[in-house]
Structure formats: structure tokens, C-alpha cells
Image (cartoon, helix red, strand yellow):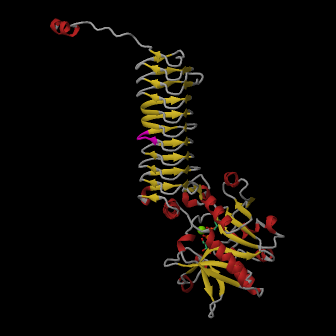
Amino acid sequence: MELAAVILAAGKGTRMKSNLPKVLHQLCGRPMLGHVLNSVAEAGVTKKVVVVGFGSDQVTDFVGDKAKVVIQREQLGTAHALIQAEEELHDYPGNLLVVCGDTPLLRGETLAKLTEMHSQSGAAATLLTAQLENPTGYGRVLRTEVGDVSHIVEQKDASPEELKVKEINTGVYCFKVPGLFAALKEISPANAQGEYYLTDIVQILIKKGLTVKAVTLEDAQEVQGINDRIQLAQAETVLRRRILEDLMAQGVTIMDPNNTYVDRSVKIGVDTVILPFTFLIGDTKIGSDCVIGPGCKITDCLIGNNNEIQYSVLLNSQIGNHTIIGPYAYLRPGTILADKVKVGDFVEIKKSQVGSGSKIPHLSYVGDATIGENVNVGAGTITCNYDGKSKYQTILEDGAFIGSNTNLVAPVKVGRNAVIAAGSTITKNVPDEALGVARGRQTNLADWAKKQRKKS
Ligand code: UD1
Ligand code: MG
């Protein structure tokens, strides 16, 4: 049967103390709403509707074409929020999952299981519940003597007896859509908070002679809602661990999972080892048999196989195979390294291509350059690519040898197998096979030092 989902995300999230809507706060590189949208998609949902309110422009921007958006202008309660989705779902024939936008730990498989139980039982509604040692704050699920769900009572409306119940409403539901919106409109705000409670739907459906079932969650941690930044950090720890364990299950070694930070979107090949204090961010893909870390921050990079990268920052770059990078290299956007390249300590590269077998081992800045194969760039080489107004290109052809402490004043080209004498400031092209020297000639004044000493 067809499956839709409504994600309730109109609340402000007052306790976050933030100008950013709560559901846009990030964990493992993705807003919490992004994780929820992902889980919902994993459960097989084909139609998604997000109810937005506080910060609706920002939330709508983030949702983009991932889901339909409906606006709840005033936050009058969870039932009122769900009714806002009626325009999108009034003639929907299938089932509907309702989840909150602030539960990023909820797994796709849990939602799939809930949906399956719901379909099999033929109930009008199925609740996802959990047993909590400390149920404070949650709605309590009340059952009849024979164990059927009878209703849900909110913390603020519950009697002392009801408050002792440890089975809580997780706020996740599966409904049959036909008849749902009519029933929602029967809900009244006559309760302690003066809100339209979605939880009241339970009694209304039962009164109509329909069945309400409940599925109890095994891992109650999954429905931990996020209300403040402490819970945000706790949830991030859980999510991070899940991501790392998935990678380990796929054949990636993570030496110290407590100190390794990998976004959900990152892909890593088998037998790659990730050492501590490494951040792998965004759209990053790493091949097999690499050693990454310690101490790397790699964002949106495509990295091949058999590479070693330590203590370095890489942004939006592409790395071939068998390269060695770091310690302390900084690869900025547009860097493309071919195979068997070495980029050593304190080297910055920006918007440049480096051919196979080339080496930039120490203390260099390479910007807007095209470097051929088997080029050796000596320590302290600087491409002077910017005159304050425009950027210019440097070309180093195959086999060129750049002596230490060279300034390459762009635009400039060094030909095949050409050699640049150390300490040169090269302002003109150097032909193939030539030696370029551009520095003051050395003069030695005999006994100069001795004479100075005598004078004083
Ligand atoms: C709700 C449930 C409670 C359950 C708990 C689980 C009700 C009445 N109670 O309580 O039984 O134990 O979730 O976490 O449903 N929202 C809107 N518009 C509104 C109000 C809320 O979009 O007008 C959204 C919020 O952004 C949030 C979700 O609905 O994502 C839940 O709202 P919240 O106020 O946190 O409900 P609880 O009081 O926690
Ligand atoms: Mg809540």
C-alpha cells in the first residue's frame, strides 16, 4: 500500500536558545530534519509533507524539493499541525506516518516495522510506544485490563496514578488516511495546555468502533527528542557511533571511534584506516587501502586508493592513487593531484593540477598552476599569482626542476626538463632544457670580517 509521511516541525524549540529553527540544528553534518527525511525515505515513503511554522522560510529553503511544505501559522498543537497537511493528503488512499522533526535518531527500519504491523493488523491507527525508566514529560499510554490501548494522557493532564505509567507515547504514529482528517477535526483544546492534542485521536477512533494498536520500541534511545543543546550533543554522539559502526562493518578500520568524526554522506573503501582526530565532511569519497589521519579535516574531496594523508586540511580537491600528503598540507578548492604525488609539510596548493610523480615536499605556495609529470618543486617555492587585481597562471612542464626559494612571477612558463637555480625570481619564460638563473651574483670580499673585528 502507498505510504506518505507528515513531519511536524513548526515548533520554535525555545530551549535551544537560538535564532535558527530547532530542526535545522545539525548533527553529523546534516540538520536534524534531514536525518528524519532520510529515515522516512528509507521506510519506503513516497510522499512527504513537512509542517513548518517558526522560521518557515529557512526550513522551507532547506526542504527544497525533498518534500512538500505546508505552513502552520499559529502553533495551536500537534493535531492542528497535522490538519495543515490536509490539502496535500485529503484524497490519499494509503497509510500515513506521522513523525516529529526533532527525533533524528529514529531509524528507517523502525518506521518500516511500524508500518508493516499497522498494515497487517488493519488498525485505524498504530502508535509507537516505549518503556522509559523516567517517563517525565511524555504522554502516557493507558491500556484497558485486557491490554488494549485506551487513550493517551499528557504529563500536564495526568493524575498521580497515571504519572506512574512507564509506557510513553513516542509521538510517532501510523494512520489510515481515509477518515483521518474528519476525526482530527473532532479534537477540542479542552485540556491543561489549551492545545489541540494529536494524542486525543486515539479515543476518538476507538469511540467510532475502530482499532488502535501499539508497537513498543526496543531501543528507546531512538525517539529521544532534542529540546536543548545538551541533548543535541548526546544525540550526535549516538549518530556518530552508528555511522562509524556501519563503516567498520563495511571493512574500514576506525582506530578510535570516540575521536573520529564522519558525516553520514561520506563513503570509504575497504581496508582504509582512519586515525584519530580526523573529520571527514560532506560529499567526501575515499578509496581503499588509504591511511587517513591523524588530524585531518577533509571536506568534499574525491580521494583514490593507497593514499597517506596526515595532519592536513583538504577542501574540494581530487586526489589520485599512491599519493603522500602532509604533515601540515593545505589543499584548497580546485586542487587536482594525479598519482604518486608528494605534497609535504607546510605546502599550500590552490586551484592547481599536479601531474604524476611530481613532488612539492616543503614550504611552498602553489596557486593557479599547472604542473606536469615528475616535476620537483624545491623548498620555499612561491607562485606569485596575484598582482593585487588579477590572478595569473604558472606552467611547469614535465621534468622541470625548481630550485629552492624560487619566486615564479606569473604568468610564466618553465619548459620541459628546464632547471631553475635556487633563489631565483623568474619573471620570463624558461625554454625546454634550459637553466634559468635570476638572482644577484655573489661577490666574496676577502678578509672583510677579520678587518671589521680589528676596527672595533
Ligand atoms: C508530544 C505528544 C506526547 C509525546 C511527545 C513525544 C501531543 C499532544 N503530545 O508532546 O504525547 O510523548 O510528543 O515527544 O502530541 N508541533 C507543531 N505544531 C504545533 C505543536 C507542535 O508542528 O502546534 C511539532 C513540534 O515542532 C514538534 C512536535 O510537533 O516537532 C511535537 O511537539 P511538542 O510540543 O514537542 O510536543 P510534546 O509536548 O513533546
Ligand atoms: Mg517534544
- Up-down: is 409 above or below 103? above
What x and y, as percent, mark residue 40?
Answer: 67, 66
Q: Is residue 62 visible?
A: yes
Is the stretch drawn in magenta largely helix, strand or loop? loop
Give, as a single range, the part of the protein colored magenta.
324-328
Camera-side residue: 255 or 15?
A: 255
What x and y, as percent, mark residue 368?
Answer: 56, 29
Left or right placement of residue 31 versus residue 230 in this view: right
Camera-side residue: 187 or 413?
A: 413
> What quarter of the picture does the C terminus occupy?
top left
Q: Quadrant of residue 86?
A: bottom right
Ligand 2 sits in which quadrant? Answer: bottom right
Identify the residue at image location x=59%, y=64%: 104
Identify the residue at image location x=77%, y=71%: 2
Question: In the rendered structure, does residue 325 fall within the stretch colored magenta?
Answer: yes
Left or right placement of residue 454 versus residue 1 in this view: left
- Up-down: is 27 above or below 399? below
Identify the residue at image location x=42%, y=51%: 277
Camera-side residue: 247 or 193?
A: 247
- Up-down: is 423 above or below 367? above
Q: Please identify the residue farthest to the right as the structure is shown.
A: 91
> What quarter of the picture does the N terminus occupy?
bottom right
Q: Is residue 410 visible?
A: no
What x and y, as percent, mark residue 365?
Answer: 47, 29
